[in-house]
Amino acid sequence: MATINDVARAAGVSTSTVSYVLSGKRSISAETRARVEEAIRQLDYRPHAGARSLASRRTWTLALVAPLRTDVNVGVIMKFVTGVATRARDHEMDVLLLTQDDPRGVERAATSSMVDALIMMDIEAEDPRIPTLVELHRPAVLIGLPDDPRGLSVVDLDFEAAGRMAMQHLLDLGHTEVALIGPTPTVLGRHTSYAERLLRGYRSCAEAAGTEPVVEPAEASHAGGADAVGRVLRRRPELTALVVHNEAALPGVLTALGEAGRPAGKAVSVIALCPADVAVGQQLPLTSIDLPAVRMGEIAVDLAMARIEGIEDPEIRLLVPQLTERDSTFRQP
Amino acid sequence: MATINDVARAAGVSTSTVSYVLSGKRSISAETRARVEEAIRQLDYRPHAGARSLASRRTWTLALVAPLRTDVNVGVIMKFVTGVATRARDHEMDVLLLTQDDPRGVERAATSSMVDALIMMDIEAEDPRIPTLVELHRPAVLIGLPDDPRGLSVVDLDFEAAGRMAMQHLLDLGHTEVALIGPTPTVLGRHTSYAERLLRGYRSCAEAAGTEPVVEPAEASHAGGADAVGRVLRRRPELTALVVHNEAALPGVLTALGEAGRPAGKAVSVIALCPADVAVGQQLPLTSIDLPAVRMGEIAVDLAMARIEGIEDPEIRLLVPQLTERDSTFRQP
DNA sequence: ATGAAAGCGCTAACAG
DNA sequence: CTGTTAGCGCTTTCAT
């Protein structure tokens, strides 16, 4: 492997000149630049990442803390990761993948100068990892809004607005017998931030309209969705509309509705809260509020870069929900 | 941040002694060790990863090249990633996440000494990335068997044996009117290695038994599965058994069979090739050949470590398929 | 516009 | 069993 000194020698300049050609941090005569660039090409020179980070105190890598439970929401997780990874490359950054169930890993990556900033996903309302994160005194971004962000940057969908929007849309269509099928009991039990905020929005809107908000959790499976439909129909026999915030249960919900003689899009309006492609890929294309997961990953990187560059203050970015009508909703006569 | 020199001073020893306490590469008196460890604790010392990699030419990180298309097989991808990430930690390695659609990224990571080895997934039969990988002269492991591994280590399920096993199991149950629903036309068109090998095994077994092998691709969606069932039933009206190698199409396949009055487990035996949890989470628990994706990720790391340590030669590890009977198969009278 | 040189924090000979 | 020291390859003052 050629070093910066090899390049300098080949180009007949000093090492610092090569360094500055690479970083652009001072002006170089066109002629010198050309010679250096030629030498770089000839020798196929690549800066040594470790040496660079040792001298510059920048690693050009981001840590991404991901939940690798393989059970729920895999699709959404992958979209976050995709957004982060691609946007990181736009900033010429690399991504170090840390797993949630190795809590020491986060600390290690930060304190051994492996990364310039951390991005953490799957944030709970009172996430115990946040104090630890703050202690590290490193730029950090949360994908998911906790109760108290403690001065960290955050990106998330405005789930409360989404809850209101879903309910209001159904009300506008003439539905009053509405229920919500939410995430697994575990997720709700963990006080996961997004789940609770969606419920809050849904409930407040329902109550304002004078209709009692019915909520059922569902296990993240076909059977889970089907069971939830059964419980919902028992609690609200006249049901004409459903909000579903549980990707994995969606197929079961739709099948069960059909089998109960109350097909989605015909007898029951269904609004899903999930990535658009998931809504489209069901038995019938679902009216949905999009969860723009790729976009959120991208924004997380932008927020991290702003903190690294030290220009910007921490920022909380809530995305405005977008509802797209497809075939699962109808006007209730 | 405390440095190794701070620790040495605090413990009243030389820097090399601290280094050796940390690496265990030479013997240290119990007393000295204790003093050093105390100093490390006091100062909360963490080795600087860049400095370490500069001096030792080891980065203690693995590159994982992942396909981030968010469309198909997300579940399997996540399982590979999970296996790699967790096993890497067992070896005290970290994971740098590279995306497939940034082909230069692989080269960059390798040539700028960011990683000690590379793991690449989603390998095609004639994968154009393999020559490039070989050129890097770095330890590399493929998850997926190409036609010519070019001396790289490989881990994969023995898909050909799996194809044979599925067909043979159905024959043993008395089925002769069998068809296979495979991956998307695109995947098949790309000559994806695993898809073709499965077909080969299935075909050879079918032909040996004197029954014509019927194969239909399916788009990776509910509708895709349903359509494929339609086509299969047209080609083989007396169908009594189905092998399905397409996770995302599975729900559509099962629903369509039901709607055609040929329910899975009753009129049609179904064997799925997918991760066990996917097989279990369907409308009805499916008899399946497991795709042990987490395990494959783990093995990939082990193979990579063996190459890094330089002890072992490259190795091709094909896992023996395991069939688990559940509720979707029955003996054909 | 360019060069010289002092580190950055660690490892691994070499020396005892 | 321990210490001294020469790098590892790069960035960034300080000089000119």
Image (cartoon, coloured by chain):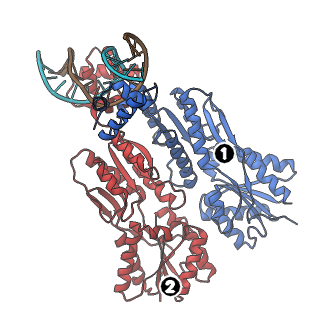
Chain colours: A red, B blue, C brown, D cyan
Q: Mark 2 points at which residue?
A: A240
Q: Which mark is residue B20?
A: none
Q: Is residue B191 left or right of residue B8?
A: right
Q: Mark 1 points at which residue?
A: B194
- Give the residue type at disc 1: Tyr
Secondary structure of the residue carrying tag 1 is helix
Residue B172 pos. (x, y %): 85, 56
Q: How many numbered circles are shown? A: 2
In this rendering, the answer to whether A197 lies above or below A304 is below
| Mark 1 closeness class: few <14, some 14–19, many ≥20 residues within 10 Å | many
Q: Image quarter for residue B282?
A: bottom right
Residue B220 pos. (x, y %): 60, 58
Residue D16 pos. (x, y %): 11, 15
Q: Image quarter for residue A122?
A: bottom left
Secondary structure of the residue carrying tag 2 is loop
Q: In which quarter of the image is the N terminus of chain A?
A: top left
Is residue A86 in view? Answer: no
Q: In this view, does A31 lie to the left or right of B245?
A: left
Residue A243 pos. (x, y %): 47, 76
